[in-house]
Structure formats: C-alpha cells, structure tokens
Amino acid sequence: MSGNTAPRMKSEAGLLDIWRRLRKNPLAMFGLFIVVLLIFFAITADVIAPYKYYEQNLINSFQSPSKEHLFGTDEFGRDILSRIIHGSRISLQVGLIAVGISVIFGGFFGAVAGYYGGRIDNLIMRGMDILLSIPSILLAIAIAASLGPGLYNMMVAVGISTTPQYARIIRGSVLSLRGQEFVEAAKAVGSSDTRIIMKHILPNCLAPIIVQSTLGVASAILTAAGLSFIGLGIQPPTPEWGAMLSGGREYIRDYAYMTVFPGLAIMITILALNFLGDGLRDVLDPKLKR
Amino acid sequence: MKGKFSSKVAVLAVAAVVLVAMFAVPALAKDTLTVANIYDARSLDPIIQNEVAASNAICHINETLIELTDEGNPVPLLAETFEQLDSTTYKFVLRKGVKFHNGDPFTAADVLYTIERAKSPLGSAIKQYPEIIESAEAPDDHTVVIKIKYPFTPFWGTIAHTSLAIVNKRAVEEKGDMYPLEPVGTGPFFVKEWVKNDRLTLERFEDYWGKKPEYTTLVIRSIPESVNRTIELETGAIDVAFRIPVSDVTRVKEHNDLDVIGGFEHSVTYMGFNCEKEPWSNPKVREAIALALDINGARHAVFRGTGLTPVSIVPPTIKYTDKELPAPKRDLEKAKQLLKEAGVQLPLKAQIWSNSYKPRVDLAQIFQAQLKEVGIEVEAKVLEWGAYLDGLKLGEHDMFILGWVISSVGPDGIFSGIVHSKGGSNYSRFFNEEIDALIDQGKTMPDGPEREALYKKLQQLVGDARPMLYLYNEENFFGVNKNVQNFRPSPRGYHNVTGVTFKE
Amino acid sequence: MLKYIVKRIFSLIPVLLGVAFIVFTLLYLTPGDPARIVLGEQATEEALAEFREKEGLNDPFLVQFGNYVWKAVTKGDIGRSYMTRRSVANEIMSAFPSTLKLALSCVIAAVLLGIPIGILSAIRQNTLFDNITRFLAIVGLSMPVFWQGVLLILLFSVKLRWFPASGFDTWATLVLPTLTLACNPLAVITRMTRSSMLEVVRQDYIRTARAKGQTEQIVIWRHALGNALIPIVTVIGLQFGSLLAGAVLTESIFSIPGVGRLMVDAIKMRDYPVVQGGVLFIAVAFSFVNLMVDLLYAWIDPRIRAQYR
C-alpha cells in the first residue's frame, strides 16, 4: 500500500496549486467562466428559457430580434434564444458522452497496450493505426450512416471515431510510467495488473487525459454540429446548434440572424473549451506546452 | 528589420486580394447559355439512371423517336410518322438524313440496338420502361415495328422517355467505360467537357437535322446550395437558375435584370397512413386526422403561399384530373368526435416519417403541433433515403410523407404505383378490390370519355377511402435573365433549352 | 534509403486490409437496400433481385469481403459505381484534382502566412503581437468551418460581390473555400512554428552563433529555423494529409466537385463500391503523405538520414 501514497499525495496537493496557477491565466479563466455558464444553462434550460423550444407560432415566423424575442424567431415562429439555451444541453451532452466513450475505450486499449507492451501492444496499436488512417470526420460520417440518425447514435459515432487518438496518448504516458519505482513496488507486493493500472498508473497520467478531453469535448461538439449540418445528425425539433445553423442557411440573405446566433453559440463554446484546455495544458503538462 | 518584414507581408496580402478581385467576375460571351440545376447527372448514358437531372442533360444530346407535348400528346422527333396498327403493335417511320455526332447515319438498326441494350441487365435502373416491349423489328432501314406484351395505353410515354433515347452502337462499343462521359447521339448538342458535379459543357452540333440552336455553347452547372444559385443568377454568371427557393422569389422578381417563371410538375406529395396497422386501419381515424390538420395553412407557411393544395391524387397537370373534388377543411370538434367514436385512447402516440427534404420535414413539424390539439402526440422522424424506404417496406411506420412524380403520361402510373395493392410503392398497405379492378381496367382502355369517367371515379373512391392525404403540388420557380427568351419549363421536370434565344 | 521506402510500402498492406474490413463491416451494418436506392422508387422487383444477384449482395459477408480483396489484389479492380456504372478508380480520379487543388492552395496559404507569423511571435515572445497572434490562433481553431463558409459567402458573394460562391474553375472560385479551410491549418502551423522556435532559441548553438557575432537575421533564419523545422514539417504534412482526405463540409458548402463530396454522396446513396474505394484511396494518400514527410525529415536532418541506412 505504501507504494501509492506518495504520488497520490502529490496530486491532491497539486489541485490547489493547479487552481492557483490557472487563475493567473485570464484566457483560461474566461474559458472556465463560459463553460460554467453553459453548464448552468444546460441544467436550468427549462426554467430560464423564455419559451418552449418546440413551441410553434406560424403567424410569428421570421421575427427579427426584438424585446419579446431577443434572438428573433425561426421559420416556425419558434424563439431562437430558447432553442439555443436548450441546445447547450444537447451540445454538452454530445461533447461529454462522446469524449467519455473515447476516453473509456481509448483508455482501456491504450493502458493495456502500454502496460503489457510486446505483441499485445503491437496488435492494439496496429488496429488503432488502421482507424487513424481514416480521417475522423469521414469515419464519423460512415458510422453515423450505419447507425442511423439520432442523438445517441451521433455521440457513439463521434466517440468511436476519436478513440484511437486517446489510445495513443494514454499508451504513451503508461509507457513512461511503467518502469517507475512506485509501479515496481506495487508489483513487488503482489498487486494484480488491473489494480496496478487502475490505482497506480492511470491516476498518474490524468494530466494529459484531462487536457486532451477538454480539447476533445470542443472537437466532438464541432464534429457533431458538422454531422447535423450535412443532415446525418439529430431529429427535429431537437434544437441542435449545427442543425439550426443548417436550417437557417436558406434564409441567410433575409434573416441572417437565424444562422449567426447558432454559429456564435458554437464558436464561443469551442473557443472557451480551447482556452481552458490550453490553460490546463500549460499548468498540468509543461512538457506538452506549445 | 522585423517591422519591415511584416509590413511587406501585409502589402503582398492586400495586393493578392485586389488582383484576385479584379478577375472575380468573368466576362461572358453571348453565344453561351449557362443554366444551373440542383444536381448533376450521375451518368450521361440514357439507361443508367432514372432521374430528372440525367434526363435534363440527355435530352439535349440524344433524341427519342417521339416527344410528348406538355398535354401528353405524341409528336414526331426521330420518327417522322408513327401509328398504332392494333392494340399491341406500333409502327414508326424514321426520319432520313439524320446523322450522329460521330458522322454515322441514323437507321433502324440503331433503334433496335437501343431497345435491346435498354432491356439488358445494364439497364436495370430503367427496366420498367422497355419491359413492356415484346419485340422490335426493322422491315427496312427506316421503319421499325414494335410489339408490346399487352395493350398499354400510356405506351407513347414509354417511347418518349429519355431512357429510350437512341444511341449509336459503334460509339457505345468503342468508348466502353468512357461512353457515359462522351455520349454520342443525334441531338442538337454534343459533349465538349464534363467536370462532374460542377459543369457540363455542350457544343452545338453543326450537322444537326433540325432547327439548330442560335447559340453555340450550352453550359449546365450543378449548384446544390439554393442560395448560391440565386447569387450566381444575380451576378450574371448564369442565365437560368432552376428551382430557386420560394424565399428568393420576390428578390429575383424585383431585380432589374431578372424575371421569375413559375411552373408545376406532374407530381404530388402526400402523407400516407399504414392501413394495416392499428388504429390507422380504421377509416374513421384517418378521417379524423384529415380534419385535425390544416393542410392548406401548413402549405402556405412552408411554401409561402406558392403551389397548390391538391384535391385529387392526380396532379392538376395530368389528363383526367378532377378539380371539382372537395378541398380539405379543418374541423377540430369533428375530429375529436370521430376519434372518440373509433374508440381511440388519447393521448395517442404516433410517428410521422419523412426523408430529409426540407419542406417535408417542415410539414411534419407543423403537423406535429397541429395534431397535438386533438390529443395525438406525434414524433417527427427524419430518415435518410435508404433507411426510409427500408422502414416503409417493413411496414413499421404510422404516417409518412412521400412524393410521386409521373414520368409517363396519363393518370395510370400514380394509381398502379401507390394505390394498387400490388403497386411497388404502395407503402400505405392499402387494399380495395374494387379500386384494384378499376386500375387494371384503366391501363388497357383506349383514351376517350369512357376512360375519363373511369379515372374520375377512381379519384373519388381513393379520396373517400383516404389511404393518404394529399399535401401539396409544388410550384417550381425558375430565375431567368431578362435577355433570355423562349425558356419554358416543362412539367416533366427536365427542360430542353435548345430553342432559347438572346435579346440584343 | 530505398530499402526503408520499400519496407514502409509493405507495412501499408495490413493497414489497407484493415481499413477495407472496417469499411466493409460498417457498410454491411448500414440499413437501406442499395438495390432499391440505386434503381429508384419505381424499379420492379425483378430488377431489384437481378441487381442484388449481380452485385453479390446476397452472398454471406465474408464471401463478399473475400471477393472484393481477391479482385483488388489480382486484377487491381476495386469495382464499379452502382450509380454511374463506371469504374471506381475513374470516379475517384475525376474528383481528386479538385480536392488536390484546394488542399494545395490551403497549405500554401497556411505555410506562407503561418511560418513568418509564428517566427515573429516567437522572437517577440510575450509582446502584444505575440499575444494577439496566440489569441487569433485559438480563434482560428475554434471557428466551425461550415459557419465560416456561410458567413464568407454572405459577405464576399452576397454583399460585396467580390468572389463567386460556387463553381470550381477560375482562380476567383478558389478564394472563399481557401479562406474557409486554411484557417485551421494556419492556426496549427503558427502555433507549432512559435513553440518550436522558442524551444530552439534556448539551445546552446544559438547562443554560440550569437556569441560569434552573427547578425540576428542569420541566427534566426539559418540556425534557428533550420533546426525548428522538423516538427513544423510534421504538422504541415498532417494538415495536408487531412485536407486531401476531403474537406467534406467545405466542399459541400461551395459546391466543389471533390473527393469529400463524392464520399458523402456515395455514403448517402449506398454506393458501396465508391465508399470502399474512396476510403482506401484516402488511406493510401494519407500514408503516402506521411512517408513523404518522413523522407523530408531525412533530407532536412542528416542525423535522421543516417538511421535509414
């Protein structure tokens, strides 16, 4: 047991330290603020949205932004602001779950490959190479097409398509930790492989996972919006930002706000996540600093 | 030093932008007509695809024996005269002195080859057209006699379909895999260059037998984004834009150099019920839905008042359509009453399926809101084309939105396609013996008042039985530059622009 | 060197087999009967059956896969498009030039702007210029391409009428797609150049060069850049590779007849042979670019060259 106390202690003490250092980075703090705000919107969407996102009012369609409808209304007279607020729920869900899928699968394969090395490593990483040689957007499109449309299928498609990237990163960190003393010590006291990986190795490669995941949520949201944009995404009347943007394209010349607001929502979200991810990287993983 | 460098970069960048901007709008010679369609043809080989985008290109390159007028009457094209000898035999006397683009003369052998080729496995996509042909013979070089399997009144439509446009045997065999890119026909234009999914450039065929077009080059571009089609029209990069969106109609109309021409196609879009599934099998429930919906209002919202709300399954451009049938009317009280009588448990959960064509998705969403008012909770489900047809085949659906385009002439096609119990697209899973018998009878009956009476009766019967509700006849809009004359859209859905002229 | 290249090419074989297998599996699981979609709504049952039989769609999965691989290996035949009946190789080769043109113009734009900006940013670390550059680079990474494309069309095609919104023949038609698509690689290249330069500038030999009294220009351009180039070349290669894979969204917004659009259309229309062939082609192109990058390393850095012997 004694083998794992030292690194754990370090990471707990580090949390405050990380926060202190992160606070010095204004862009990262801005990112964090937006992300927290989005999470707040997502949780309280039903309460704070001024209208129901599916509520139609055909007489009231194509209203420019006004006091009643801050972001205007769409072709069915639905309130765009309310739809964007509800959309934050969809986007965060897609981002988190897709990245969750990637982290779980990528983490598993990466850890196993890195820990055992040799043939297993070779086999797994060749498999990942195969997936990596198909561009992830194309892979996501193909998976989305084979699963059919829908929110959950979209998450799975995006999640699987980015799995190999996580596997690579985690394998790398595991590889560098494998030979370290505290792992050897755990082995010496007879801990099982699963236990060593879960208790000793993975907690110590959290830094790159956290960084990659933060940036990954951004790119997952972007990919999902792209899938919706080309019509392989979610079902109406779900207010997905990419789908809203795509739907407003036809009216862009008269009612540009229909495309501008969802686009802004996507961009700000991605920007915030990227700022946060970059800041975290600077703090957590100076080696990766770009 | 460093400062100088970055200012140099800035200067270069500005210079580049200015340079490119100067060449941004290419000058157009007036001997070129440029039209823009939504999609490109998949193939220029007439028998590969049954699609209007292909027909739109092919009708300028290859010609059929006869042509149909918009009213559906046959007129000569490569056949100078034609007659029906008996109920299953047709005779065509071919035009003399016609040349293919490769210089070969056009003879009866080409017609036989074309038919034989269309019936071969290569033509499986258009098989339903030549299938009716039993045999074709050539008593001499300029006569062809075609026998069909059973009496079939819409046969003129079959012969006039672009899938039976005459091809040249030597060219097909010589070019092999390249043939679909460099087709050879007798038409007024031949293919100069084809950049797939971008532009097809056609040149005037100087040895054309008929009236030659007044311009030398025809460019058919494919621009899927509707906004982009309108922009290109406004900037003068294209002369005719097919199917501009309703949201752009006013803008184009108000433009000084542009006009809008509207037109209907031989088509109808409907919402079908799964008549084999509870509770849609109950005619009362179907009637209740009809009363619960404001179809006319929905159409107005989606198409901004353009198009028509159909009263009959037969599109208004088609022979024997009955325009006197009652129009749909909303009556929420009566709808609720009928649902109660039918013993339907409210709230009823149901799905409306559609493919991703935007007006259909929009309608499904409006219906979703309207049906809520009578206690039916609808989920609008958008499926991609392949999954959509598969699901419909399996019969898992409740309601679905689908369209039908009549490619041959007369009302027969739509009834035998989507109403007849053996119809390949009867996704309503509807079965009515009397209606089936009438459809079979109408197919073989010669044109005349008797046939008209039969189809009027069919329209009424189907309307009352309600296997589907008719949603809209879409009106298509064409943006046209004012110096373009004699452009007339055709209800067939593809448009021959050979006769277009330019105003000086 | 040659031996190394040959080895690399051989190592592609299992990857391509794997790619083919994955795509085959995905397509097999995809709902929708290709026969029905290809032949159309009004096709007869016989025609459908005939089509399925001819295309081997009734065969068991592994038999279909085996046949595909066998034909590809023995005859170099990767099938015919269901839609156009032309060979898949022809279909891809007619779409590829557009994609290549777009990818090249994006990479050139990104390199010409990204490397100088990255260097300046590194030289003036923590100045206003550096901060703005870093900020803009993240913004560039965060722009959804499809939104950017639509906005550029709105501004430059609709409002200003400077550049056409569609078509792909003149230079002018290249401008908007390039502006849309180059943002991301530009941001990546700028960031990489900056960080790589910062790393190198701290090294001893730079200090030595400075100590020897060489001008700052020579130090930066010759000594530092030369050594910082390797990671930069890597990201350029990666960016170029992914651009070749087809800028799916950009191609569809600007109606560009490239590989990305071909693939999306083929996936939607269940044109299995084109999807198969297209993904394989992209995998090969991707690997080819990676090989080129590796060879470029060797050319830049004699130390690596020595390893390939």
Image: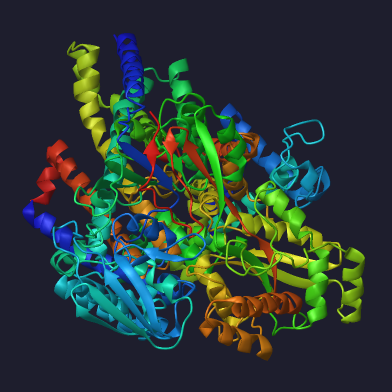
Apparent side of residue B279 relative to residue B273 in the rendered image (left or right) = right
**Front one among A40 and B64:** B64
Residue B428 at x, y = what percent?
65, 78
Residue at figure coordinates x 24%, y 13% from the top left:
C216
How many labels were placed on the picture?
A: 0
Q: Nearer the viewer, residue B355 or C134?
A: B355
In the image, A101 versus B236, the foreground residue is: B236
Where's residue A269, x and y in %? 60, 40
Image coordinates for residue B49, horizontal then vertical, percent:
37, 67
Quarter occupied by the N terminus of chain B: top left
Instruction: Classify residue B61 as left or right of residue B158.
Output: left
Asked whether residue A281 appears in the rendered view, the answer is no
Query: Relative to the observer, which residue lies in front, A195 or A71?
Result: A71
Q: Position of residue A144 (x, y in %)?
A: 50, 63
Q: Is residue B32 visible?
A: yes
Report the coloring of the rendering: rainbow
Using the rendered view, name the quadrant where residue C175 is placed: top left
Q: Quadrant of residue B209?
A: bottom left
Q: Is residue C10 left or right of residue B194?
A: left
When the figure is inspected, residue B356 is found, relative to residue C232, above or below; the finding is: below
Vertical position of residue B5 compared to residue B73: above or below = above
Image quadrant containing the C terminus of chain B: top left
Vertical placement of residue B189 versus A194, above or below: above
- On screen, residue C237 above or below C138: below
